[in-house]
Image: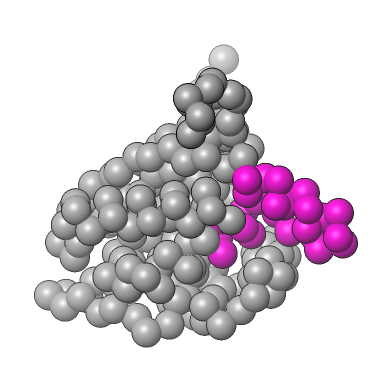
Amino acid sequence: MSDNVIALKGMRGMIADNMRRSLDEAAQLTHHASCDVTRLLAYKKLLNDEGIKVSVEDLLCDCVVSTLQAHPAMNGRVKGKDIVLSSAIHLSVAIALPGNLLVAPTIFDAETLSLQQKGEARKALIAKARKGKLSIAEMTKGTFTVSNLGLSRVEHFTPIINIPQIAILGIGQTVKRPEINDQGDIEARSMLGLSLTFDHRAVDGGPAAAFLTSLCECIEQV
């Protein structure tokens, strides 16, 4: 029985080349954290009960945008010897496609959009990606990327930076864990794994950790 040989060509080849180039060019480091999404999940249910249909990813992206506004050093691109921080947040969202393909199109000016508008924009990008209708700008002009593996059993992972962007956030599985509350009692809480990979040429470990901490606080205070 012969082996199945799959050529790295076409879009798969482009993805492979970009991944290799990212690891070659960027000084990549990953911070991991877990945050309590019990309140966020309750808020999602409340919105859905009121007829406002949003996903967990939509709510997380909304928190990412808010946190990037407070930590602008994470929002930008590295071009040669320059760090170019963007005044606008162009949020790239990784989308898996059939055939083991992956794209990360961009929600432009995400800081100007409401929660619902961000969700609608993300859905529109998914539809365009599946039809192969994404523009070059949508594929290349992002300033920060979110990659969601929340439907898998992966809690933490090491996402590869979508160069020349400064950072990428990986979203892992949500699991129930016993946690001690403010009253000292143990209760079951929904805990989400987050992984932030950043380019150490542009951002040091401390500011990256501060961003991830602020993001967790934003999520937990929804």
Question: Residue 142: x percent and y percent?
Answer: 44, 72
**158 in relation to 205, above or below:** above
Where residue 78 appears, as percent x and y from the top left, is 24, 71
Comparing 97 with 30, the one in front is 30
Question: Could you tell me if residue 23 is visible in this image?
Answer: no
- Say if the magenta span includes residue 77: no
The image quadrant where one finds the N terminus is top right
The stretch of residues the image draws in magenta is: 39-62
* Picture quadrant where residue 105 is located: bottom right
Colour scheme of the rendered structure: one colour
Left or right side of 47 for 139: left
> 167 left or right of 3?
left
Relative side of 54 to 40, left or right: right
Magenta portion: prevailing SS class = helix
- Looking at the image, which is closer to me, 86 or 47? 47
- The residue shown at (36%, 52%) is 212
Q: Residue furthest left?
A: 81
Q: Is residue 110 above or below residue 41?
A: below
Residue furthest to the top: 1
Residue 17 in which image quadrant: bottom left
Residue 207 in sight in this render: yes
Q: Position of residue 152 (x, y in %)?
A: 59, 33
- Residue depicted at 50% across the width and 45% down the height: 171
Residue 215: image quadrant is: bottom left
For this rendering, which residue is in front, 129 or 66? 66
Asked if residue 50 is among those painted magenta in the image, a careful observer would answer: yes
For the C terminus, give its image quadrant: bottom right
The residue drawn where x is 23% and y is 58% is 207
Q: Residue at x 58, y 30 (%)?
A: 189
Residue 187 drawn above or below residue 7: above
The percent position of residue 35, horizontal first and vertical second, equals 47, 41
